[in-house]
Amino acid sequence: MTDALSNGAVANLARKAKQAGRRLANAPSAAKDSVLTRVAEALRREAAAILKANAEDVAAAREAVARGEMTRALFDRLVLTPERLEGMVRGVTSVRDLPDPAHRVIERTQIAEGLELRKVSCPLGLLAVIFESRPDAVTQIAALAIKSGNAVILKGGREVEHTTAALVAGIHRALAETEEIPAEAVTAIYGRKAVAELLALDGVVDLIIPRGSNALVQYVQQNTRIPVLGHGDGVCHIYVDFAADQNMALRIILDAKTQYPAACNTVETVLVHSSIASEFLPRLASLMIEHKVQLRGCARTRESLPGLNLAEVASDEWHTEYSDLVLAIRVVDSLDAALEHIEQYGSHHTDAIVTEDADAAKRFLREVDSAGVYHNASTRFADGYRYGFGAEVGIGTNRMLARGPVGLEGLVTFKYELLGSGQTVSEFSGEDAKPFVHRKLPLP
Amino acid sequence: MTDALSNGAVANLARKAKQAGRRLANAPSAAKDSVLTRVAEALRREAAAILKANAEDVAAAREAVARGEMTRALFDRLVLTPERLEGMVRGVTSVRDLPDPAHRVIERTQIAEGLELRKVSCPLGLLAVIFESRPDAVTQIAALAIKSGNAVILKGGREVEHTTAALVAGIHRALAETEEIPAEAVTAIYGRKAVAELLALDGVVDLIIPRGSNALVQYVQQNTRIPVLGHGDGVCHIYVDFAADQNMALRIILDAKTQYPAACNTVETVLVHSSIASEFLPRLASLMIEHKVQLRGCARTRESLPGLNLAEVASDEWHTEYSDLVLAIRVVDSLDAALEHIEQYGSHHTDAIVTEDADAAKRFLREVDSAGVYHNASTRFADGYRYGFGAEVGIGTNRMLARGPVGLEGLVTFKYELLGSGQTVSEFSGEDAKPFVHRKLPLP
């Protein structure tokens, strides 16, 4: 099962998946939902076999950790337990219970007497997802693909090959129980050579989604003509305005830096207005040091924190995604300087302002050109589940490409504005987590 | 003005345009509208200079026609008259009068107490448009760009360089009259080398729109990492079902083939259900021959029209966009066979079914994976103006890329369904043109 595939094998699988995808695309909502119910049942039924397969991966991974070839964090992510598997099954049923996004009429226009134009949603076709070591990615992606009517090719990391194969086998048995959706609609491929072959399948694969390190995303982006959903870097900023509630700013920065430092929506650089620097920086520094965050700063930051002997951030270092307990700090003289810094060094992922000044917030939300622009909330909220999408396949920093004749509407993309009052992701995590509401509001 | 630019000059202009675009993106609607009013005034005021510049291009083009290096059709398109210029000016003011597509709240969700998520539209950034010889492209594209808040780089064909420069000079003088939008937001570049430099500017240019021949579109697609809005081929189909109103089918095919044969939304292949072939094909053939359309067919079509000695369509010829008064005909035994043909040979642009059978129409609209899927209407309707978008920058056959966290909604694209009762574009053209209604209808 985990042998490298022979030449052309991926292309063959992809063509079959594409054909299966056409059936899936046209399947009624009820058929897709019933398949997802069967997938959940199959995963529960086959739990023992899946956990056994995972144990093989875990054994190999344990040796890799012992040899120093795998981090403990990576190891922890690939271990399945009955509880984690049950969480994955619940993920499948919660995707099933979302509304069907396909075949919806988005807009209707009467063009002339007896002539009506309808803009209707429809699946993309064939997705390919390359992910690293998380078994939960398999079931989450498969569920999102089936629900949205897209076929999918899954390529998991070598470290979870046995687990992936066991999960996909379960999904296949569930698909085989139905007539409407061919099992080939969900296909796994293995081996590094398969990735190279996959990247060459433009015209067959419609969207490729690399989930993993920056190196993986960049490798994919540079080696394919298939549209890529993903983001190379997540260099997120928090700007602490002179009119900030400083306690709120500290709470938000602590959450955005330490709640899960390896995530792409973690803050990397804090910009502080010069008029509050002498008061705010010592408080920020002592909080960060207390939480084992290593600080780096611009010349003025270092001057404001003379006792700490901070490393100076070199000018091209402001582009860095540390993905670790490291925080860069820069003092700026104005909102404009903050906007300028974010434009120059940011990655158009997610950036936040902390301020009580509504005008400053409005300018920041409007002028920062990122997929997420936040007021008084932690950048860690940039996540499909927290946004109320049920789950996510990835986070895009691309702009939209329109389809059909493109007028004004096709020349704009969108961004997400998050308007908070100091919320942190920590409050919504763990045992005493506050609940999400996810209530649609009327448009203004 | 039309000298080739020195190395790096395009990159410089593009960076300035991008910066100007940031101002434009944040300009209020009223400022953008007032700029468009000034552009219209400037073009009227400078009409004499523009027509004089055009006369230079026309003189050169006349010689090219005499040398057989330019077609008469191309020549006709580049000639400006006072009437055509006035039409272009009216185009600018009609784009001005459309609603602003940017900074609209598309969706609002309450995430938690005091935490609101807004999906808001925003401009793409910097567009680059490469077009051939139509002077009206300059003003139409500039107006769409300004209205949508995007900066734009214009690269027109060599044959209209003087005209383009005069038009852009007028637009620049209009922009210079305002404080809010820097003139660099609309920039023209000249020379073939400039295109190569432009295509390398990924990260600066956000979307590139080639308007012209397939060769141009393919050259651009193969030589840039910038997202491309466009379509290589427009191989459009009309399927005449056994339950078709045959008179309607003839009217629609005549319009779709002859109303403007060089357009991308012209029909190239007609698929005819075998049960009506013996009755329908002779009628279709005589109508086409009467309108000087050269016919080509599959073996069964040739058998059904024995007297005509039709050329046989080779199997890979079904991919051909003739862009001329040439029509390929194929007899198929079922709706499934028609769907199969369109999937195999189509270009996902626009395809139509003619039938009185609602179920067949429903399947066709759902299962054909094209940007436009039509029932009982001519493929020639695939056009931004006819769809009610005011104008268009191009027609995309790409699928959408989503931004921010991507859940189910980001895994679907859309298509346009057009539901007609025999409408042809001819009825909406010329002196006695029926009016378009373009009335938004409530969603079902």
Image (cartoon, coloured by chain):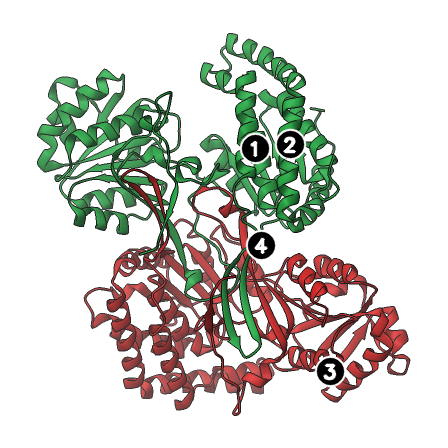
Chain colours: A red, B green
Q: Chain of mark 1?
A: B
Q: Which residue is mark 3?
A: A247
Kind of residue at disc 1: Val
Residue flagged by tag 3: what amino acid is it?
Asn
Earlier residue among tags 4 and 1: 1
| Drawn side of residue A330 relative to residue B241, left or right | right
Q: Chain of mark 3?
A: A
Establish if B62 lies above or below B268: above
| Residue for point 60% across, 70% down | A419
Q: Which kind of residue does numbered mark 2 sit on? A: Val
User: Which residue appears at 34% of the width and 60% of the height?
Assistant: A102
Label 3: few (<14), some or many (≥20) within 10 Å? few
Specify the label residue B92 is tagged with: 1
Residue that protrudes farthest toward the bottom in the picture: A431
Measure the C-alpha gap from mark 4 to mark 1: 21 Å
Q: Nearer the viewer, residue A303 or B89?
A: B89
Q: Name the side, left or right, on which B123 lies relative to A157.
A: right
Residue B59 percent across, percent down from the top left: 59, 10
Given the image, on which type of amino acid does mark 4 rest? His
Horizontal and vertical percent position of residue A39: 29, 76
Q: Report how far apart the C-alphas of labels 4 and 3 lie in the structure.
A: 31 Å
Q: Are marks 4 and 3 in contact (CB under 8 Å)?
A: no
Which image quarter holds the N terminus of chain A? bottom left
Q: Does A330 sit above or below residue A109?
A: below
Secondary structure beneath dot 3 equals: helix
Q: Is residue B48 left or right of residue B270?
A: right
Which residue is at the front of the view, A104 or A33? Answer: A104
Kindly identify which numbered label has been placed on residue B103: 4
